[in-house]
Amino acid sequence: MNDRAPYHIGPLLRRRGQTIATAESCTGGLIGSLLTDVSGSSDYYLGGVIAYANEVKQHLLGIDAATLAAVGAVSEQVALAMARGVRHLLGADYGLSTTGIAGPTGGTPDKPVGLVYIALVGPDVERCERHIWDRDRLGNKLLSARRAIQMLLEHLSEQT
Protein backbone atom coordinates (compact mmCIF):
# COMPACT_ATOMS: atom_id res chain seq x y z
CA MET A 1 0.00 0.00 0.00
CA ASN A 2 1.01 3.49 -0.65
CA ASP A 3 1.46 4.94 2.87
CA ARG A 4 -0.40 8.01 1.63
CA ALA A 5 -3.49 6.00 0.60
CA PRO A 6 -5.54 7.02 3.67
CA TYR A 7 -4.93 10.66 2.71
CA HIS A 8 -6.32 10.13 -0.80
CA ILE A 9 -9.57 8.52 0.33
CA GLY A 10 -10.98 11.62 2.02
CA PRO A 11 -11.06 13.91 -1.01
CA LEU A 12 -12.72 11.20 -3.12
CA LEU A 13 -15.44 10.53 -0.54
CA ARG A 14 -15.94 14.22 0.27
CA ARG A 15 -16.38 15.09 -3.40
CA ARG A 16 -19.23 12.57 -3.58
CA GLY A 17 -20.66 13.29 -0.14
CA GLN A 18 -20.13 9.63 0.80
CA THR A 19 -19.09 7.83 3.98
CA ILE A 20 -17.29 4.67 5.10
CA ALA A 21 -17.65 2.37 8.12
CA THR A 22 -15.50 -0.60 9.11
CA ALA A 23 -16.14 -4.03 10.59
CA GLU A 24 -12.89 -5.58 11.76
CA SER A 25 -12.09 -8.93 13.23
CA CYS A 26 -8.46 -9.96 12.71
CA THR A 27 -7.26 -6.36 12.27
CA GLY A 28 -8.70 -5.32 15.63
CA GLY A 29 -9.43 -1.70 14.70
CA LEU A 30 -6.27 -1.04 12.72
CA ILE A 31 -8.16 0.06 9.59
CA GLY A 32 -10.10 2.60 11.62
CA SER A 33 -6.88 3.76 13.23
CA LEU A 34 -5.16 4.29 9.88
CA LEU A 35 -8.18 6.13 8.47
CA THR A 36 -8.44 8.39 11.50
CA ASP A 37 -4.74 9.27 11.37
CA VAL A 38 -5.91 11.76 8.73
CA SER A 39 -7.11 15.11 10.06
CA GLY A 40 -10.70 15.74 8.98
CA SER A 41 -11.53 12.05 8.59
CA SER A 42 -14.68 12.60 10.66
CA ASP A 43 -16.16 14.11 7.47
CA TYR A 44 -16.37 10.65 5.90
CA TYR A 45 -15.43 7.95 8.44
CA LEU A 46 -18.49 7.17 10.57
CA GLY A 47 -16.91 4.56 12.83
CA GLY A 48 -16.34 0.88 13.16
CA VAL A 49 -17.14 -2.33 14.97
CA ILE A 50 -14.41 -4.63 16.21
CA ALA A 51 -16.31 -7.87 15.82
CA TYR A 52 -13.80 -10.34 17.19
CA ALA A 53 -16.28 -12.76 18.77
CA ASN A 54 -18.90 -14.56 16.69
CA GLU A 55 -21.56 -13.27 19.09
CA VAL A 56 -20.66 -9.71 18.12
CA LYS A 57 -20.76 -10.63 14.44
CA GLN A 58 -24.26 -12.03 15.00
CA HIS A 59 -25.77 -9.46 17.36
CA LEU A 60 -24.29 -6.23 16.01
CA LEU A 61 -23.67 -7.03 12.36
CA GLY A 62 -26.62 -9.37 11.80
CA ILE A 63 -24.66 -12.37 10.58
CA ASP A 64 -26.72 -15.54 10.66
CA ALA A 65 -25.55 -18.19 13.13
CA ALA A 66 -26.16 -20.85 10.49
CA THR A 67 -23.74 -19.12 8.11
CA LEU A 68 -21.08 -18.97 10.81
CA ALA A 69 -21.61 -22.65 11.61
CA ALA A 70 -21.57 -23.71 7.96
CA VAL A 71 -18.58 -21.77 6.61
CA GLY A 72 -16.85 -20.38 9.69
CA ALA A 73 -16.00 -16.81 10.63
CA VAL A 74 -12.99 -16.79 8.30
CA SER A 75 -14.75 -16.95 4.95
CA GLU A 76 -15.78 -14.85 1.99
CA GLN A 77 -19.45 -15.12 2.98
CA VAL A 78 -18.80 -13.75 6.47
CA ALA A 79 -16.49 -10.98 5.24
CA LEU A 80 -19.19 -9.78 2.83
CA ALA A 81 -21.88 -10.08 5.51
CA MET A 82 -19.73 -8.05 7.93
CA ALA A 83 -19.29 -5.27 5.36
CA ARG A 84 -23.02 -5.27 4.60
CA GLY A 85 -23.85 -5.34 8.29
CA VAL A 86 -21.68 -2.40 9.34
CA ARG A 87 -22.85 -0.40 6.35
CA HIS A 88 -26.44 -0.93 7.48
CA LEU A 89 -25.72 -0.50 11.21
CA LEU A 90 -23.93 2.84 10.85
CA GLY A 91 -25.74 4.12 7.76
CA ALA A 92 -22.60 4.39 5.66
CA ASP A 93 -22.32 4.39 1.89
CA TYR A 94 -19.48 1.85 2.05
CA GLY A 95 -18.69 -0.97 4.45
CA LEU A 96 -15.15 -2.36 4.65
CA SER A 97 -14.39 -5.54 6.59
CA THR A 98 -11.68 -8.03 7.51
CA THR A 99 -11.82 -11.50 8.96
CA GLY A 100 -8.90 -13.90 9.19
CA ILE A 101 -6.28 -15.76 11.15
CA ALA A 102 -3.46 -13.42 12.14
CA GLY A 103 -1.50 -16.16 13.91
CA PRO A 104 0.75 -17.55 15.09
CA THR A 105 -1.91 -20.01 16.33
CA GLY A 106 -5.39 -20.81 15.08
CA GLY A 107 -4.57 -22.14 11.64
CA THR A 108 -5.83 -25.41 10.18
CA PRO A 109 -4.94 -27.24 6.96
CA ASP A 110 -8.01 -25.67 5.28
CA LYS A 111 -7.54 -22.25 6.86
CA PRO A 112 -3.85 -21.56 7.47
CA VAL A 113 -2.33 -18.81 9.56
CA GLY A 114 -2.25 -15.65 7.47
CA LEU A 115 -5.54 -16.35 5.67
CA VAL A 116 -7.59 -13.14 5.49
CA TYR A 117 -10.73 -12.09 3.65
CA ILE A 118 -11.22 -8.39 2.93
CA ALA A 119 -14.62 -7.19 1.72
CA LEU A 120 -15.90 -3.91 0.34
CA VAL A 121 -19.64 -3.31 -0.07
CA GLY A 122 -21.26 -0.14 -1.35
CA PRO A 123 -23.87 1.23 -3.72
CA ASP A 124 -21.72 0.30 -6.72
CA VAL A 125 -19.58 -2.57 -5.44
CA GLU A 126 -19.66 -5.89 -3.64
CA ARG A 127 -16.21 -7.42 -3.67
CA CYS A 128 -14.11 -9.74 -1.54
CA GLU A 129 -10.42 -10.61 -1.75
CA ARG A 130 -8.69 -13.63 -0.25
CA HIS A 131 -5.08 -13.33 0.90
CA ILE A 132 -2.61 -15.59 2.66
CA TRP A 133 0.06 -13.44 4.29
CA ASP A 134 3.33 -14.92 5.50
CA ARG A 135 4.29 -12.49 8.25
CA ASP A 136 4.05 -12.63 12.03
CA ARG A 137 0.81 -11.62 13.77
CA LEU A 138 1.42 -7.87 13.64
CA GLY A 139 2.69 -8.05 10.08
CA ASN A 140 -0.40 -9.99 8.95
CA LYS A 141 -2.65 -7.44 10.64
CA LEU A 142 -0.84 -4.52 9.05
CA LEU A 143 -0.82 -6.05 5.56
CA SER A 144 -4.55 -6.75 5.89
CA ALA A 145 -5.41 -3.22 7.04
CA ARG A 146 -3.27 -1.62 4.36
CA ARG A 147 -4.74 -3.81 1.63
CA ALA A 148 -8.27 -2.98 2.79
CA ILE A 149 -7.54 0.74 2.52
CA GLN A 150 -5.87 0.27 -0.87
CA MET A 151 -8.87 -1.75 -2.07
CA LEU A 152 -11.19 1.12 -1.11
CA LEU A 153 -8.92 3.68 -2.77
CA GLU A 154 -8.70 1.65 -5.98
CA HIS A 155 -12.47 1.37 -6.15
CA LEU A 156 -13.05 5.06 -5.49
CA SER A 157 -10.40 6.01 -8.06
CA GLU A 158 -12.02 3.83 -10.71
CA GLN A 159 -15.32 5.63 -10.15
CA THR A 160 -13.97 9.12 -10.91
Image (tube, helix red, strand yellow):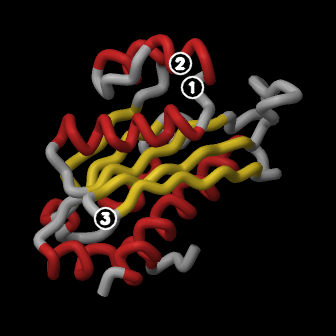
Amino acid under disc 1: Ala
Cα distance in 3D space between marks 3 and 1: 25 Å
The residue beneath circle 3 is 124
Drawn side of residue 111 relative to residue 3, left or right: right
Nearest to the observer: residue 1 or residue 154: 154
Q: Looking at the image, which residue is at 32% across and 28% down? A: 61
What x and y, as percent, mark residue 23? 38, 40
What x and y, as percent, mark residue 5? 44, 76
Drawn side of residue 121 relative to residue 110, left or right: left
Kind of element beneath mark 1: loop
Sequence order check, earlier mark of 2 and 1 = 2
What x and y, as percent, mark residue 36? 30, 60
The residue beneath circle 1 is 73
Q: Which label is found at residue 68? A: 2
Q: Looking at the image, which residue is at 41% across and 60% down? A: 34
**For discs 3 and 2, the disc positioned in front in the rendered view:** 3
Drawn side of residue 36 relative to residue 66, left or right: left
Q: Are marks 2 and 1 in contact (CB under 8 Å)?
A: yes
Q: Looking at the image, which residue is at 24% across and 46% down? A: 47
Drawn side of residue 57 relative to residue 61, left or right: right
